[in-house]
Each structure stands twice: as C-alpha cells, then as structure tokens.
Image (spheres, grey):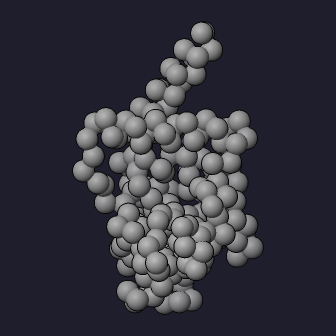
C-alpha cells in the first residue's frame, strides 16, 4: 500500500510538472526542427500531425534551423508512414526536399527517438527544436537529452482541452516517462 501511494503521488506530481512545461515555447536557433509523428490517414496527415507540421514550417520560416526532421513509422495502413507523409506535406508547402530528414521506422515515441538520434549523430547534428503537443514535450526532451542532444521544446498550437482531459494527457505522459525511466520503451 505504501508503494502504491508513493508511485501514485510521484505520477501526480510529475503530471503537474508536465503541465507546467507544456506551454513553454523554448524555440531558438538549433541544427534541426524535429516533428514528432502523429496519425496519418491514407497518405494525409491527421489534424494533429498537420498542426505540428504547420508549426515546424513557421519555425523554419523564422530560420531557426536549416533542417526539419519528420518522425514516425507505419500506422494502420502499412503503405504509408507518418514520417513520409510529413515529408510530402512539407514539400507541398514549399520546404525544399534537401532540407527534410525522415525517420520512418518508429512505432513508438522511444523507438522513433532512438532511430532519429542515430540519424542526427551520423549527420553531425547536436541540437534540436522538438515540435509536438505540449504534454508530449517533457518526455521527448528528456529522452533526447539522455542521448546527448541539446533540446528545446516548441508546442504546436494548443487544442482547447478541458481540465480533466488535460490532466489525463499529462498523467499518461507521466506514466510513459516513468516506464521509460525503468527501461520500458514506450
């Protein structure tokens, strides 16, 4: 019972911390803007992925990085990957193909970040601006920092979420972070 109380208290405190960090925009010059994947529908970005990509386009337009990296493997349709759909979307909006890096293998946040880290290392890129939903940034930043990267978060345009929904998203990320800390790749 004491252990359960401790774990629950830890996750609630961590959820509050994730919530506080979820609105911080730390965008500044970096080597790459990394867009975390989200669902795609038959070759088209979901509304969430579209908002993330649009935010990356905005940051790229401010010349904060020379590259945009899209991430994410196949979802429900094995014909498409989140990373490749993101690349196509960016090209259709005028981002030069040579400025786009794609990680298209990851089936989870941790898997995508592991593959993306290897790509960035091979290219000699050491700093990145992460674009995702605000609640996702806490975990992504810590995973990449452990890989040795300098990381800044820049949340996409926020959805209008109610209090209980926000807390659920923060809590879910706290659980994901806690699992990652003990070696479970989620």
Q: Where residue 128 sits: x, y (%)?
A: 55, 64
Residue at (41, 42) in percent of width and height: 169
The foreground one among 107 and 71 is 107
Residue 150, quarter of picture: bottom right
Camera-side residue of 135 and 66: 135
* Residue appearing at x 56%, y 51% in the figure: 141
Q: Position of residue 127 (x, y in %)?
A: 59, 63
Q: Is residue 114 left or right of residue 137?
A: right
Please identify the quadrant where the N terminus is shown.
Answer: top right
Quarter of image, res 48: bottom left
Q: Residue furthest top?
A: 2
Q: Residue at x 67, y 58 (%)?
A: 111
Residue extending farthest front? 77
Classify 138 as above or below 150.
above
* Position of residue 44 measured from the top left corner of the image (x, y, whole percent): 42, 78
Q: Is residue 122 above or below residue 111?
A: below
Q: Is residue 30 visible?
A: no
Measuring from the top left, give residue 63's x and y in whole percent: 43, 77
């Amino acid at each position: 019972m004491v252990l359960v109380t401790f774990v629950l208290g830890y996750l609630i405190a961590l959820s509050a911390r994730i919530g506080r960090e979820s609105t911080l925009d730390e965008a500044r010059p970096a080597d790459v803007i990394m867009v975390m994947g989200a669902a795609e529908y038959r070759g088209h970005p979901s509304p969430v992925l579209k908002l993330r990509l649009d935010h990356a386009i905005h940051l790229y337009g401010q010349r904060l990085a020379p590259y945009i990296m899209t991430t994410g493997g196949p979802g429900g349709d094995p014909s498409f990957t989140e990373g490749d759909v993101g690349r196509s979307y960016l090209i259709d909006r005028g981002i030069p193909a040579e400025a786009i890096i794609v990680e298209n293998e990851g089936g989870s946040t941790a898997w995508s970040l592991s593959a993306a880290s290897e790509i960035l290392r091979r290219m000699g890129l050491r700093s990145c601006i992460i674009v995702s939903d605000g609640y996702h940034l806490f975990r992504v930043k810590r995973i990449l920092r452990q890989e040795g990267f300098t990381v800044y978060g820049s949340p996409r345009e926020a959805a209008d979420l109610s209090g209980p929904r926000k807390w659920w998203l923060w809590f879910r990320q706290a659980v994901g972070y806690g699992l990652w800390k003990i070696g479970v790749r989620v």
